[in-house]
Amino acid sequence: MANARMRFLGSDDVDRIHSTALRTLEEVGVLVHSEEVSNLLLEAGADRAKDGRRITISEDVVKEALASAPKTILLASADGDHDITIPSGDGSLYVANGGEGVRMVDLITGETRPSRSADLRNFAKLIDAIPQVDFHWPMVGALEEPPATKEVAEMKISLEWTSKHIQMGAITADQARKMIQMAAVLTNGPDNLAKRPIISAVQCPISPLTFEKGLVEAQVEFSRCGIPVIAMAAAVAGLTSPITIAGTMAQITAENLASLVISQAARKGAPFVFSCDSSPGDLKTGSIDYGALEAPLFRTAAGEIGEYLGLPKMVAGVGLENLSSTLGNLWEGVAYVATQSLVPSDLGSGLGGLDQAVGASYEQLVLDAWVWEIARELRREFDTSDDAISYETIASAGVDGNFLGKKHTAMRFKSEFTSTRMSETTMSTRLKVAERGEAIARAHVEAKRILEEQWKPKISPEQSARMDAIVYGR
């Protein structure tokens, strides 16, 4: 079997990037804004730098952390029907929607407004209903919630309206403890939660080479309880990391390895996912440029480094972003997403996002999912056996010139090409002239249909009350 994947770095390139990351950790170190976590690292064999502020980490400490980190991870679901194990046996890329936008966009009317709890609830319902979305991120923020309860309240909403695995993050240790308590309500205790983690945590290093106090202390809480941690390093080339792809990769590798050491210091064998959300920066405006031509190369390089380290990885970014408003049919968006589908990654996210992930739209989520269903086909396994090559067919047709009438053609044409079995990819559909915005209009109808269904919460009134007590202390 053969799998289509993008490759960017040679083995010498990966070795050089990895060696630079190790040198960076040993000679420069990381700034950890938590005395508790700094002491944890020192107990694990790290040292204080000469300036007394930074923590340096030797290659031996990194190797020990890599040896203890699990090579496969279960991302469990509350209902047991949507469990994900990474890496998958067949090379599948499991995807989520985007996360933590602050603005709702109606792509039909053009209306834009701040997001609220009701929007997050609706997105959770859509994610639960759309089969192409494998796990859930809180798509938008519940901005009416007080800062002290916002993230935890968002988790309660997510647990209430989707049974799929939930991935989010905490910004303080107290928040992390509350999230763990809430998830444990559905698993009959923290021990079962560690065995079947229905949540995972995105805890980002801050580029360059910094760990913020609340985020890193939350990471320790999650790791101690067996919750998978995703170290999503989001360096922006030229702004918070070197301007080159290779330089940025060296830095995010160092940040991931430092994060790995922190998780393993908290608990040997704690599940950890190598992650990167890096992209070029717009040096004129200071913003992230997810749509840059080279953006998939950052993700491809990160995936190759994750493979080299032997860690599960989340480096793929999937979604059309603002391109969606120009589409007449789904095929027009496939080429853009297909490139993203070939990134060597186990997990990805981004469906439903707009305006560099600041905004989100119901229609966008549905349309992204439809396009992704087509684009992910490029990632499937392709048969390269002797039977697939079929010397006999070549030999026979070499004499009579007829491939169309051969059994080999009849048996395999539907499995080999999407254009023979998916209506949206046929030549007639691709050539059909469609009006601009027609695809979004279709997605709007589907999103409305899903949200108008009769929905029941995924948790019982008793479980809801217990979670409210955790969120609001009542």
Image: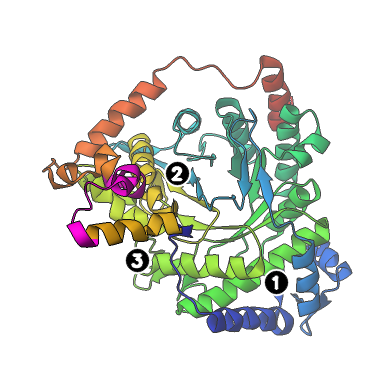
Query: Which quarter of the figure is the C terminus placed in?
Result: top right
* Image vertical order of residue 303 relative to residue 176, above or below: below
Which label's residue is closer to the chain start, 1 or 3? 1
Per the image, the residue denoted by label 2 is 102
Crowdedness of circle 3 by 10 Å Cα count: few (<14), some, many (20+)? few
User: Chief secondary structure of the magenta span?
Assistant: helix
Per the image, the residue denoted by label 1 is 31
Per the image, the residue denoted by label 3 is 292
Say what secondary structure mark 1 lies in. strand
The residue segment tinted magenta is: 398-419
Q: Amino acid at mark 3?
A: Ala
Say what secondary structure mark 2 lies in. loop
> How far is mark 2 from mark 3, CA to CA?
23 Å
Q: Are marks 2 and 3 in contact (CB under 8 Å)?
A: no
Q: Position of residue 331 (x, y in %)?
A: 25, 47
Q: Are marks 1 and 3 in contact (CB under 8 Å)?
A: no
Question: Quadrant location of residue 195?
Answer: top right
* Image vertical order of residue 69 relative to residue 454, above or below: below
Q: Say whether residue 208 is visible.
A: no
Q: Looking at the image, which residue sits at the far left?
A: 433
Q: Say whether residue 138 is visible.
A: yes
Q: Which mark is residue 215?
A: none
Q: Position of residue 463 (x, y in %)?
A: 70, 21
Whether residue 425 appears in magenta in the rendering, the answer is no
Q: Residue at x 63, y 46 (%)?
A: 85
Q: Position of residue 14 (x, y in %)?
A: 57, 78
Q: Residue at x 22, y 43 (%)?
A: 426
